[in-house]
Image: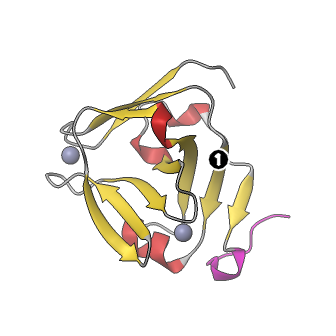
Amino acid sequence: MSSDKHNGGCMCGAVRFIAHGAPKLVANCHCKDCRRASGAAFTTFVDFARDKVVFSQAPAAYQSSPGAERLYCKTCGSPIAYRGEGSPTEINMVLGAFDSPQQFTPTEDCHILSALWKTQQ
Ligand SMILES: [Zn+2]
Ligand SMILES: [Zn+2]
């Protein structure tokens, strides 16, 4: 993947961001928390170093479990990112927040035992 800028934001546009460089990982998470937080069957995350993502304004944060928070827009409610203290230098951006999400292809599936459907292996 190229080392350019990846723009994104929430549905209403109040929170915008630019992620710089290539993502460290693109993965689907099938855990129950991601299902609740997104409303979808699973969440696809695009992982960047935290210092590579610049926000136009700080998104709101919800502590979804000890040491983990989910960032969202307080105006429109769109999920934006996940931050966990297990990976203190990383931020996991949600795929759907990017203006061009088709540029990222997931290569891994996490929490597969919680998946609603069998994925192709
Ligand atoms: Zn918004
Ligand atoms: Zn998850």
- In this rendering, the answer to whether 78 lies above or below 121 is above
Circle 1 SS class: strand
| Residue 25: quadrant of the picture | top right
Residue 34 showing in the rendered view: yes
Instruction: Please name the residue shown 86% across and 64% down the image.
Output: 121
Image quadrant assignment for residue 120:
bottom right
Neighbour tally class for label 1: few under 14, some 14-19, many 20 plus, Cα within 10 Å: many
Q: Position of residue 5 (x, y in %)?
A: 49, 21
Q: Range of the magenta residues?
A: 112-121
- Kind of residue at disc 1: Val
Residue lying at the far right in this picture: please name it. Answer: 121
Q: Main secondary structure of the magenta part?
A: loop
The location of residue 6, given as percent across then percent down, is: 48, 27
Q: Which residue is mark 1?
A: 26
Q: Position of residue 31 (x, y in %)?
A: 56, 75
- Any part of residue 39 in sight: no
Does residue 62 appear left or right of residue 41 in this picture? left
Nearest to the observer: residue 36 or residue 85: 85
